[in-house]
């Protein structure tokens, strides 16, 4: 598997692409199964939106905190 796919100046990391695709598929399956249990869509979305937002924030935080020592040593995120 290619580690990155380049579209000119845009670099797409395939690991992140697959994780994003997995999250989308899991969300779709979960929504479908909860609708089969006759849970209203508004409740599903009210509960799912904070989970998705929190996961995104934590993901970015972990990524940048892991690069913090490099930033302190060199002054760049590189």
Image: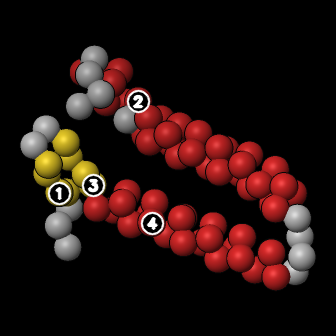
Callout 4: SS: helix
Determine the CA span between mark 4 and mark 3: 12 Å
* Helix, strand or loop for disc 2: helix
- Left-right relation of 4 to 37: left
- Give the mark nearer the N terminus: 4 vs 3: 3
Depth check, front residue: 56 or 72: 56
Mark 4 or mark 2, earlier in chain: 4
Q: CA distance from mark 3 to mark 1?
A: 6 Å
For the residues carrying marks 1 and 2, which lies nearer the camera in this image? 1
Q: Residue at x 25, y 51 (%)?
A: 12
Picture residue at 80% right of the left edge, 75% below the top: 35
Q: Which mark is residue 13?
A: 3
Kindly indicate the quadrant of the structure image that contains residue 24: bottom right
Earlier sequence position, callout 2 versus callout 3: 3
Task: Name the residue nearer the viewer: 50 or 57.
Answer: 50
Residue at the spot 84% in from the left edge and 55% down from the top edge = 42
Q: In the rendered image, which residue does mark 4 sit on?
A: 21
Numbered circle sitting on residue 5: 1
Q: Dots 4 and 3: beta carbons under 8 Å?
A: no
Q: In the displayed structure, would residue 70 be above or below residue 54? A: above
Residue 53, image x and y in percent? 65, 44
Where in the figure is residue 39, as x and y percent of width and height?
Answer: 89, 70
Name the residue located 62 percent from the left edge and 71 percent from the top edge: 28
Quote the CA–CA distance across marks 4 and 2: 28 Å
Nearer the observer, 62 or 56: 56
Residue wearing tag 2: 68
Which label lies toward us, 4 or 3?
Answer: 4
């Amino acid at each position: 598997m290619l580690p990155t796919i380049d579209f000119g100046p845009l670099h797409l990391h395939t690991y992140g692409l697959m994780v994003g695709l997995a999250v989308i598929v899991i969300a779709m399956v979960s929504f479908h199964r909860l609708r089969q249990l006759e849970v209203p869509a508004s409740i599903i979305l009210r509960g799912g939106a904070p989970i998705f937002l929190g996961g995104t924030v934590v993901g970015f935080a972990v990524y940048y905190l892991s690069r913090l020592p490099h930033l302190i040593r060199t002054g760049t995120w590189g």
